Image: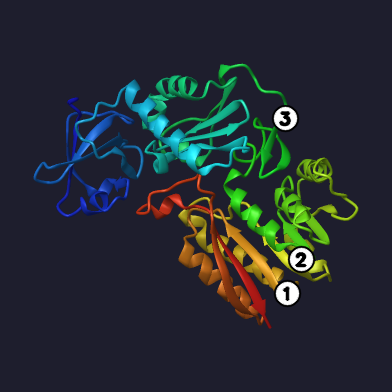
Amino acid sequence: MADYPQLILKEGRERSLIGGHPWLFSGAVAKIKGHPEPGEIVLATTTEGQPLALGFYNTQSDIAFRMLTRDVAATVDQGFWQRQLRNAAALRDRIMASDATAFRVINAEGDGMPGLVVDRYGDYLVMVTSTAGMERRREAVIEALVDEYRPLGILERSDGPARKLEGLTDRTGWVWGEEAPESISIRENGLAFEVDIRTGQKTGFFLDQRDNRSQIGSLSHGLSVLNCFSYTGAFSVYAARGGAKRVVSVDSSEPANIAARHHLEMNGFSVEDHPVLKGDVFQYLRKTEESFDLIILDPPAFAKSRREVQHAARGYKDINLQAFRHLATGGMLATFSCSNAIDEALFEKIILGAARDAGKTLRLLKKLAAAPDHPTSLAHSEGRYLKGLLVSALP
């Protein structure tokens, strides 16, 4: 058993860890035995000294402790990371379709590796580290990824506000093997897409929406569909394959629109029948006189932090209100938020408010979430950043 510094908790503050939540905030800490640096592994204990879990420690973050394992006798060495990766790989082997060539390999806390996200695109991996603990073990993780997946290359895209909160600077670039071509061809549920893992949104593609795209496709037969914030058109391609009579895609990025047209055509669909429009979605919905049987709202995160929640809530309400006004009688709306700071209850309240202002009565058809290759702890609601509702509106 390794001799780790100890994080002794205030009385009663162990309940969240015992209940399965993987985080402890700085206010839960009574004292520290030893002198751990940011990112070091510590042993969390009760006030009485009962061992609880091993995890990453960081004084520079409000989240002082991120749990790695309840096995307090474990040694967190190279073998530990290899076991974590093997466990994650075994789960994907069970849940992923055999023809899928792009999916999430590691989903941070959901796979017991807080601060590490790894996505696979064909023979290449894209990794993101966002915690000081994972930063300190970056080389060990890269070695374990190579051993487990034998990729041609690994690209790191470790940037964004989460790293700054941990006291880290951004780092991007190829960290192992050969560089990928400018675009990588992937297959998803029998459809083909091309992904730019260097500059595309997130790690190149919205892998978390895979099952929701399939759901939308199954509902689209004979319908007129509007895909807002369409990015490279994945929802549109699924809707077209599902038999939609017309799919209109709207996004403000012309490079994304060019990719969306290409994806429609490479899967055998006409851009004349399924137009892709450049424009601001808010303005488009205010100006168009067309109604749709099915509308998809998958905007970028309106709230990057708790401070932005009020402003974001207004944005979500406005865009959903405009969508309801263009929803045909009996039509369906698939609406999403990927803002971590907007929890599920608040999101539902926003959608209800928008429907009320539009004079609509909603029927909930299904709650939507990230695909199962993005697992989360049941006790860790913060990990479920993507939330969505499939609703039908009555006048």
Residue 284 in picture, x, y percent from top left: 79, 62
Circle 1 packing at 10 Å, graded few (<14), some (14-19), many (20+), is many
Name the residue located 12 percent from the left edge and 42 percent from the top edge: 50
Q: Are marks 1 and 2 in contact (CB under 8 Å)?
A: yes
Q: Give the residue number, with chain letter if any, for mark 3.
A: 183
Residue 228 figure quarter: bottom right
Secondary structure under the numbered disc 1 in the rendered image = helix
Name the residue located 34 percent from the left edge and 45 percent from the top edge: 62
Give the vertical position of 194 relative to 220 (above or below).
above
Closer to viewer: mark 3 or mark 2? 3
- Left or right? Give the position of 187 relative to 119: right
Q: Which mark is residue 357?
A: none
Residue 343 in picture, x, y percent from top left: 47, 60
Q: Are marks 3 and 2 in contact (CB under 8 Å)?
A: no
| Mark positioned earlier in the residue sequence (1 or 3) | 3
Secondary structure under the numbered disc 3 in the rendered image = loop
Amino acid type, callout 2? Leu
Q: Give the residue number, with chain letter if any, for mark 2.
A: 285
Give the vertical position of 254 relative to 39 (above or below).
below
Circle 3 packing at 10 Å, graded few (<14), some (14-19), many (20+), is some
- Cα distance in 3D space between marks 3 and 2: 32 Å
Amino acid type, callout 3? Ser
Q: Which mark is residue 325?
A: 1
Is residue 268 visible to the viewer in this orientation of the structure? Answer: yes
Residue 312 figure quarter: bottom right
Name the residue located 77 percent from the left edge and 53 percent from the top edge: 241
Residue 229 in picture, x, y percent from top left: 71, 54
| Mark positioned earlier in the residue sequence (3 or 2) | 3
